[in-house]
């Protein structure tokens, strides 16, 4: 049976503080790389959603430009964007679950290598920063008993925003997107049906993956 990450850390280092400290440095570097990738993915997903809304509700042909990147307002682009968004959601969940696993590993290593720092919740102060709308992870490895009231409040708000952005927004966006697309291009467009199928599969696999990750130790 698979062991939880905390147990794997304990079995791997078994009181070897020096080795745990060295591995904690590697874990933190990996944590930072994941945060960078996750920030880019989250921002790109919102830009794709915004671009779709601007294009699909536009009354006249136009082009949307983000920095040096341009999107022409064609039927192909409009139909493809919801599938692109679904893939970015899938990628965001994949990175998020790995981010949380590395966070757990890092806190376990710090607990072993620097127990006083762990007990005082210092690990949370150097946690890599993520966008406020993509709230994942735990605020403190020991819970909220060490946090100020303002930190506890923002932690609750982050959890609420996280549920909305990660679970409700993708479903709401995809639902209204394909409702509008079928209304606009009809039910006889094969490209539209292909993209609808791709989107359903990606969203379904995303939530199945999250469920499987959640029940594992």
Image (cartoon, helix red, strand yellow):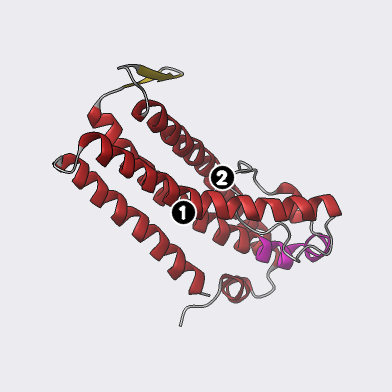
Among the 4 quarters of the image, the one containing residue 120: bottom right
On residue 21, the disc is none
Q: Is residue 96 above or below residue 185?
A: below
Please state which of the two labelled residues, at mark 1 or mark 2, is closer to the viewer.
1
| Label 1 secondary element | helix
Which quadrant holds residue 148?
A: bottom right
Q: Which mark is residue 35?
A: 2
Residue drawn where x is 38% and y is 44% of the image: 176
201 sits to left or right of 157 = left
The residue positioned 36% from the left and 26% from the top of the image is 55
Query: Which is more toward the observer, 57 or 1?
Result: 57
**Would you say the magenta stretch is mainly helix, strand or loop?**
helix
The reply to whether residue 68 is visible in this rendering is: yes
Residue under the image location 57 percent in, 70 percent down: 5
- The answer to whether one can see residue 25 in this image is no
The answer to if 114 sits in the magenta stretch is yes
Disc 2, SS: helix
Q: Is residue 95 magenta?
A: no
- The numbered dot on residue 93 is 1
The picture places residue 185, in percent across and down from the top left corner, at 21, 35
Q: Which residues are magenta?
A: 107-120
Residue 49, percent across and down? 43, 36
- In this picture, is 99 found above or below 7? above
141 vs 112, nearest the viewer: 141
- Name which quarter of the figure residue 208 lies in: bottom left
Comparing 200 with 59, the one in front is: 59
Mark 1 to mark 2 CA distance (whole Å): 12 Å
Left or right of residue 194: residue 22: right
Give whichever of discs 1 and 2 has the lower sequence position. Answer: 2
Residue 41 lies, in percent from the top left, at 47, 40
- Residue 112: percent from the left, percent from the top? 72, 68
Q: Which quadrant holds the N terminus?
A: bottom left
């Amino acid at each position: 049976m698979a062991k939880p990450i905390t147990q794997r850390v304990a079995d791997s280092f078994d009181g070897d503080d020096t080795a745990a400290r060295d591995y904690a440095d590697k874990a933190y570097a990996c944590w930072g790389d994941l945060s960078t990738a996750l920030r880019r993915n989250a921002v790109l997903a919102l830009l794709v959603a915004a671009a779709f809304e601007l294009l699909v509700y536009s009354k006249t042909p136009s082009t949307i430009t983000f920095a040096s990147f341009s999107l022409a307002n064609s039927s192909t682009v409009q139909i493809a964007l919801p599938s692109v968004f679904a893939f970015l959601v899938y990628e965001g969940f994949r990175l998020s679950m790995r981010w949380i696993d590395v966070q757990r590993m890092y806190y376990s290593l710090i607990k072993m290598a620097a127990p006083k720092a762990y007990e005082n919740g210092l690990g949370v102060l150097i946690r890599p920063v993520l966008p406020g709308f993509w709230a994942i992870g735990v605020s403190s490895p020991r819970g909220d008993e060490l946090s100020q009231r303002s930190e506890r409040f923002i932690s609750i708000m982050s959890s609420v925003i996280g549920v909305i952005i990660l679970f409700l927004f993708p479903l709401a966006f995809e639902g209204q997107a394909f409702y509008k697309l079928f209304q606009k291009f009809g039910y006889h467009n094969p490209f539209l049906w292909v993209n609808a199928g791709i989107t359903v599969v990606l969203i379904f696999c995303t939530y199945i993956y999250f469920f499987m990750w959640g029940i594992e130790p």
